[in-house]
Amino acid sequence: MKTIDTINFSGKKALIRVDFNVPLNDKLQITDDSRMRAAVPTIKKILNDGGSVILMSHLGRPKEGPEDRFSMRHLTERLNKLLDAEVRFADDCIGESARQLAGSLRPGEVLLLENLRFYKEETKGDEAFARKLSELADVYVNDAFGTAHRAHASTTIVAQFFPDDKVFGYIMANELSSIDKVLHDTQKPYVAIIGGAKVSTKIDVIENLLQKADELIIGGGMMFTFIKAQGGKIGNSMCEDDYLETARQILNHAREKGVKIHIPSDAIIADNFSNDAGKKESAADNIPDEWLGLDIGADSIKKFSSIIEGAKTILWNGPMGVFEMPNFAQGTRAIAQAIVTATEKGAFSLVGGGDSVAAINQFGLEDKVSYVSTGGGALLEYMEGKTLPGVQAINQ
């Protein structure tokens, strides 16, 4: 793997694709800077070598060119503090101001370019746009795993203009090596926990995991599609009726592969979708009409926790219930704690996918698992066995 540790950046300008797509409130203040903090080690390595840094990213989804609320300038103050250095700002990413500021950049200095997506050429993967970006620097560094599944100008196309000087930053390298551990370099037993709302978004992931995992735990809203597919009564619980046959096929494939699939035997059900709803415990396959399942029950928690705590490799993608509501967070919290316990015993644990990451952070357990992936869509595609354009562009 070609990483920034293979290069001495002394006297070089590094063009880094970062993922600074951070949330802003209505006062345009950053509410979560974790993506920015994650990029600091890569930036500091280059600066400490005696190089200079040009940062490029997207922010939000601007529709028609520049919009002030999506300007990268709202990030400069926080970036100054994180890097303990003055960050210069270019009010364009390929125009005259970007060229002049990049040209005058000295070793140890940092330049932040304006939002790449102010140009439609970025998402179209336009080669001429990518070439203009490439002319700003000597080395290309991709450190934005969250956008690695997009063949955009700044994530993929630009790499071709740096045939011998393109590398992964620390975020990308850590993401890839950690995910490879749960896809290729696994210790047995390997337990995968797949949750979330819909089977439809996880079919390829599940099918790929059936080639590798020993046991697969299904939770969240998608469990009811599997339960109904086997003739269970699920009340008003979420269900994708178009995927009942798919669920049956997955169960058949698992039997053929010798993979044990565990579906919750009980559920915490509610009389409406609200934290304050009336709730009770029920058999997961015999939920009364007008009631819906919002979490897994005590028996499922006990069984799943035991399976997880005996694992050597663990992948968790998707919550067990509606953890955002405190009254229906117990199942997701218990699974998170079981993963922590297994990790303390020496298991390798990877938590990935937006909701799982939000849950592990909400419970304050993010530092007690082996790795928390920020990949989102990129993680899912990589887990499906797909080649990510942003990864391939560096490896070519």
Image: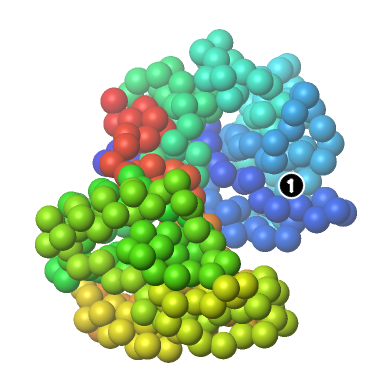
Residues 242 and 381: in front is 242
Query: Helix or strand or loop: what does disc 1 sit on?
Result: helix
Along the line of sight, the residue nearer the viewer: 288 or 303: 288
Which residue: 26% across, 50% down? Answer: 249
Task: Locate residue 182, reporting x and y percent.
Answer: 26, 58
Quarter of image, res 126: top right
Q: Which color scheme is applied?
A: rainbow
Q: Quadrant of the N terminus?
A: top left
Q: Quadrant of residue 123?
A: top right
Residue depicted at x 52% and y 20%: 125
194 in relation to 295, above or below? above
* Residue 304 visible in the displayed image: yes
- What count of labels does the image hold? 1
Q: At which x and y percent is residue 295?
A: 51, 76
Quadrant in the picture for residue 27: bottom right
Residue type indicated by callout 1: Thr
- The image quadrant where one finds the C terminus is top left
Residue at 54% from the left image edge and 67% from the top image edge:
237
Q: Position of residue 141 (x, y in %)?
A: 45, 36
| 10 Å crowding of disc 1: few (<14), some (14-19), many (20+) | some
Observer-nearest of 370 and 161: 370
Residue 393 percent location from the top left of the image: 36, 27
50 with respect to 98 (left or right): left
On the question of residue 367 being in view, the answer is: no
Q: Residue 284, relative to residue 245: is it above or below? A: below
- Residue labelled with disc 1: 76
Residue at 41% x, 74% y is: 285
Residue at the outermost right position: 27
